[in-house]
Amino acid sequence: MDIQTHSRTQQIKRLSRHLYGALSALRYLLHLGWLGIAIVVFIPQGTLVVGDTAIPVGKDDYLLKGLILPLYALGLALMIKLNHHFRDLMKQYMKGHIFSDQAISSVKGALNTGIAFVLLSWVHVLTAAIYSYSSGAPLDFSFTTEILIALIYFGLMYTLLWALEIGRDLNEESEKTI
């Protein structure tokens, strides 16, 4: 029996079609973030949030904006890339290619992008701590929330990757026996 044509595949195709639509809408919202970053460059005053620290930005703080906004841009680029990998995975599921090499490749890409995003979030926390310390506040930072989210994300992604690889191998074995 071909695992790819199992009766539950139709349910997976239907659900993945809905998730693909939701991820596509999210992709368009994420792309609006580039406009937001461009607007922040030209706004004379305001507050930028890095980690848990709100940093007031004055009219002539171009250096401060030049240090913080690239962190925002890199985070946005990683979120868009992560969205891309999940959309590719849902596209494979919509086609019924659940245990395909392309699906496994999408999960590996999402896993690697997730690792980069977690590392960037730690850079945000460290940057905020350094800014707060240089402003005279006591050095205080915490990675508790970020580590918890990272552990859950990586646990789920490794489990999904493992299941897809086993499914692919079982599917290949079942095709050989028929």
Image: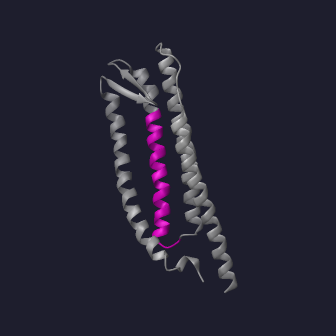
On screen, residue 134 above or below 26: above
Q: Could you say where residue 15 lies in the image, as x and y percent from the top left? A: 42, 67
Q: Is residue 54 visible?
A: yes
Q: Quadrant of the C terminus?
A: bottom right
Image side of residue 56 versus residue 68, left or right:
left
Q: Could you tell me residue 6's position as x and y percent?
A: 53, 79
Give the residue at x 35% y 25%.
Answer: 47
Count all numbered tags in the image, as a single digit. Answer: 0
State the residue at coordinates (36%, 21%).
Answer: 56
- Please report the bounds of the magenta region as a residue range: 71-97
Q: Residue furthest bottom?
A: 178
In reply to whether residue 50 is colored magenta, the answer given is no
Between 115 and 154, which is closer to the camera in this rendering?
Answer: 154
Q: Main secondary structure of the magenta part?
A: helix
Residue in front for this viewpoint, 94 or 163: 163
Assign the N terminus to one quadrant of the image: bottom right
Q: Is residue 141 above or below residue 27?
A: above
Q: How is the image coloured?
A: one colour
- The reply, left or right, for residue 30 in relation to residue 5 is left
Residue 113 appears anywhere in the view: no
Measured along the vertical axis of the image, is residue 3 above or below residue 134? below
Dividing the picture into quadrants, the one containing residue 50 is top left
In magenta segment, residue 86: yes
State left or right for residue 33 relative to residue 91.
left
At x 55%, y 64%, the residue is: 103
Q: Quadrant of residue 123?
A: top right
Residue 111 picture location, percent across and down: 57, 51
Q: Position of residue 164 (x, y in %)?
A: 60, 65
